[in-house]
Image (spheres, helix red, strand yellow):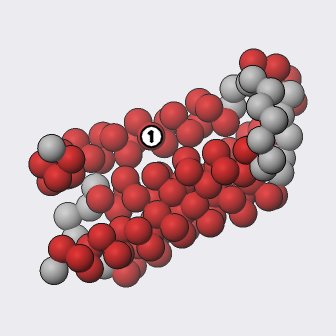
Amino acid sequence: MVRSLLQNKRRVRFLAILWTLLIFLLCLFPAKDIPDVHIPLIDKWVHFVLFGLFSLLWLLSFEKKSSWIALIVFASSILTGWCVELLQGQLSFLGRSFDPRDILADGIGGFLGVVLYMVWHQNEK
């Protein structure tokens, strides 16, 4: 079922767009409305997973497979993470702040998504 879903590039692109919007929605949620979870570095893990799936979905949405597209998607994950953090820093009424470590977690997650895609793509051959 997942394989047939992923073969429809338009559907996967739609999921990638929805996922990108979800990232912005979740990351711009007011801090007071976020439950207090006592797991070390949970915020970084959330960023890591969000952006890993971000890059994986975007890579799966392209017909052509190339290293350039992977590099662009990876750079986009970092740029999107930076934009989210910039907005968090500028919108002080949200009770959130700019955190460069979140951008690092976004980049690591984005990189992992690219690596997972590359491994998955190699196994298809």
Is residue 11 toward the left or the right of residue 77 in the image? left
Which is nearer the eye, 21 or 5? 5
Give SS at disc 1. Answer: helix
Q: Is residue 75 left or right of residue 88?
A: left
**Local crowd at mark 1 within 10 Å, few (<14), some, or many (≥20)?**
some
Q: Residue at x 39, y 41 (%)?
A: 17
List x then y, in percent, for residue 16: 38, 46
- The amino acid sitting under disc 1 is Trp
Quadrant location, the N terminus: top left
The residue carrying mark 1 is: 19
Question: Is residue 76 in sight in this rendering?
Answer: no
- The residue at the point 50 percent across, 36 percent down is 21
Callout count = 1
At which x and y percent is residue 63? Answer: 20, 64
Asked whether 114 or 65 is in front, the reply is 114
Please tell me in which quadrant of the rendered image residue 75 appears: bottom right
Residue drawn at 59 percent across, 37 percent down: 24
Give the image location of residue 10, x and y in percent.
20, 46
- Which quarter of the image is occupied by the C terminus? bottom left
Q: Measured along the vertical axis of the image, is residue 36 above or below residue 6? A: above
Q: Going 69% across and 31% down the picture, which residue do you hit?
A: 28
Q: Nearer the viewer, residue 122 or 62?
A: 122
Residue 110 placement, left or right of 31: left
